[in-house]
Amino acid sequence: MSSIKKVGLTLRLTEEMLYKELRDSLSNDWTLFLNKMGLMPVLIPNCLKDPVEYFISSGCEALILTNGENVKLVKKGNNEFSGTRRDVTEAKLFKYSLENSIPVIGVCRGMQFINVYFGGKLTEGIKGHVTESHQLEIKSGRYEDSFGADIITNSYHNVGVLLNDVAESLTPWAVKECVVEAVHHVKYPVVAIQWHPERKNPSWEVDMKLFDMVLKRKILTCF
């Protein structure tokens, strides 16, 4: 496994109706998945004045943009962002990670966020991708060599990225028909997937290997 031990995870914004509280939350599946890989998750609240300082002081060496609610990010300039509290927190963390060559993995909403950050678009109302399992079409020979051609994953999204709406700096390497299932950045150690590695998944061996490759920064040298 990678020498990286602490990984920062972004959190879902949820409203607890009984207590009328806005909360940060994360499925226990993430902790269980990362512990299996020998990684310590560091949960990053959405209400911090300086999430980057928290990320640094906590000793995080990689960033995972997790799943959750829809992306509302609007990028106004190099250093200005608007959207939900979560969107702004993730934008600050993502920008810092890019500037410092810190490995980033986006999962489901995380992939959608990354695409929007780099200028791509999202489509709502995608059919056949909620609580389904399906086979991926691998678009890269090198990914096929590493993971095989018969990858079957879970799927839990009705918002996604179509092939024509991928940001220019991102390269799709897996699709399901016209819906993009995985991308990597052409320059930075950034990989994003639409499926959920933390949940029960037929492709768990691929997920473990992919995470290991990204965290070791092999993704740039291999692909």
Image (cartoon, rainbow, N blue to C red):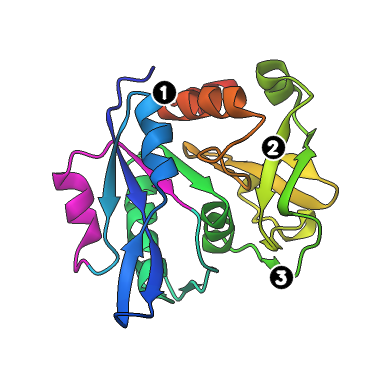
Q: Residue at x 53, y 47 (%)?
A: 107
Residue type at numbered disc 2: Thr
Nearest to N terminus: mark 2 or mark 3? 3
Q: Residue at x 74, y 48 (%)?
A: 132
Which range of residues does the magenta coloring cover?
48-66
Mark 1 surroundings within 10 Å by alpha-carbon count, few (fewer than 14), some (14 through 19), many (20 or more): some
Circle 1 SS class: loop
| Residue most extreme to the left | 57
Q: Position of residue 174 (x, y in %)?
A: 73, 38
Residue type at numbered disc 3: Glu
**Marks 2 and 3, Cα distance to the nearest angstrom?**
20 Å
Image height of 80 relative to 39, above or below: below
Q: Residue at x 68, y 48 (%)?
A: 155
Circle 2 SS class: strand
Nearest to N terminus: mark 1 or mark 2? 2
Q: Position of residue 184 (x, y in %)?
A: 59, 40
Q: Is residue 223 visible?
A: no
Disc marking residue 216: 1
Q: Is residue 11 left or right of residue 183?
A: left
Q: Position of residue 28 (x, y in %)?
A: 39, 45
Label 3, on which residue? Answer: 124
In this rendering, which labeled residue sits more in front, label 2 or label 3?
Answer: 2
- Name the quarter where the N terminus is drawn: top left
| Residue most extreme to the right | 177
| Residue most extreme to the bottom | 20
Residue type at numbered disc 1: Lys
Q: Is residue 156 visible?
A: yes
Nearest to N terminus: mark 1 or mark 3? 3
**Marks 1 and 3, Cα distance to the nearest angstrom?**
34 Å
Mark 2 surroundings within 10 Å by alpha-carbon count, few (fewer than 14), some (14 through 19), many (20 or more): many
Label 2, on which residue? Answer: 153
